[in-house]
Image (tube, rainbow, N blue to C red):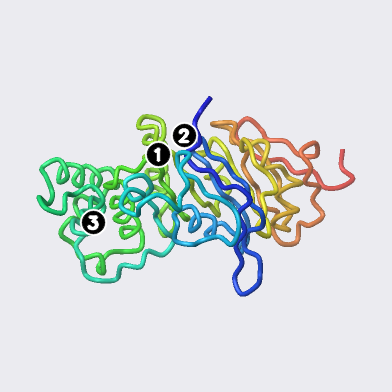
Amino acid sequence: MATNMLSLQDVSVSYGGKPALENMTIEVAQGEFVGILGPNGCGKTTLLRVATGTLIPETGEIRIESRDLRLIARRQLARTVACLPQHPAVDLAFTVYELVLMGRSPHVSRIGGETKRDLEIVERAMAQADVLHLAERPITELSGGERQRAYLAMCLAQEPRLLLLDEPTNHLDLRHQLSLLDLIVTLNRQARMTVIAVFHDLNLAAEYCNRLVLLHAGRVVAAGTPGNVLTTEMIQNVYEVPVLVARNPFSGSPQIVLAPRGHAGVALSGSCNRLLPGGQVVLRHKGER
């Protein structure tokens, strides 16, 4: 039986008296790639802040590798957990190399400084995140996508066992979205790095994650495989938009098709629609046979 990398038990958080997480219980096993989904304001980012110890919950318990988070020293925690926030806060003109080198801080001796191995890990992390060619560029001169990849390289330089990502494909074009997620899947499968990522793109989450957790109003409303979580009824209830859940013709993963404005009369249950072999979705209007 797999050991839990992260465990939240009955965790509650509120802002200004308004609940953000309510009695939330989530367990993530070592080696999983879990996607956190839900509409704006449902508690996704709050969940990550609780998991990193930057936000103390009002009630409940958080454990990392079966250890109470409150008892783990910050330096030791940084050797285990790395987090890429949605909006990284470093605005100073560090070069990409200097930024990624910061990721080694939890591992570097306070007396001897960086070793040859540390520098090799930094270079490898930049290469993995496709920013090695930007090593001498100041962060402040990078595009949003380049900056996102540089911060990911900093996280990889930590060599974490648990990687937390808040909308990791934010600012990235399609090619870099796929290459970044391919890299994360490789790390997840080959290095057994546990990954928890917040997604707004349900299709990307369905394609890359082996388990999804859907939040609504600070509570878990569904958890399981993409096929079990991303159902037409569940998505329409949580996001309040008409959709069709089809299947990706390449992978078989669930894919969300939005009904554009003016098509509210389209029947969206799976039995009323079909996906042709080439990937074309055939929608039948209400009353059609």
- Which one is closest to the eye, mark 2 or mark 1? 2
Q: Earlier in the sequence, mark 2 or mark 3?
A: 2
Q: Earlier in the sequence, mark 2 or mark 1?
A: 2
Residue 229 figure quarter: top right
Of residues 16 and 262, the one nearer the viewer is 16
> Does 285 appear above or below 47?
above
Question: Along the horizontal axis of the image, is 184 left or right of 58?
Answer: left
Q: CA–CA distance between discs 1 and 3?
A: 24 Å
Q: Which residue is mark 1?
A: 182
- Number of other residues with Cα within 10 Å of mark 2, as a class: few under 14, some 14 to 19, many 20 or more: some
Q: Which residue is mark 2?
A: 30
Q: Amino acid at mark 2?
A: Gln
- Tell me what residue is drawn at x 59 percent, y 31 percent: 252
The image shows residue 86 at horizontal and vertical percentages of 44, 61
Q: CA–CA distance between discs 2 and 3?
A: 26 Å
- Tell me what residue is drawn at x 32 percent, y 48 percent: 76
Q: CA–CA distance between discs 2 and 1?
A: 19 Å
CB-based contact (under 8 Å), mark 2 and mark 1: no
Q: Amino acid at mark 1?
A: Asp
The image shows residue 128 at horizontal and vertical percentages of 28, 43
Q: Which residue is mark 3?
A: 102
Secondary structure found at label 1: helix
The residue most toward the bottom is 16
- Tell me what residue is drawn at x 68 percent, y 35 percent: 275
CB-based contact (under 8 Å), mark 2 and mark 3: no
- Tell me what residue is drawn at x 20 percent, y 42 percent: 121
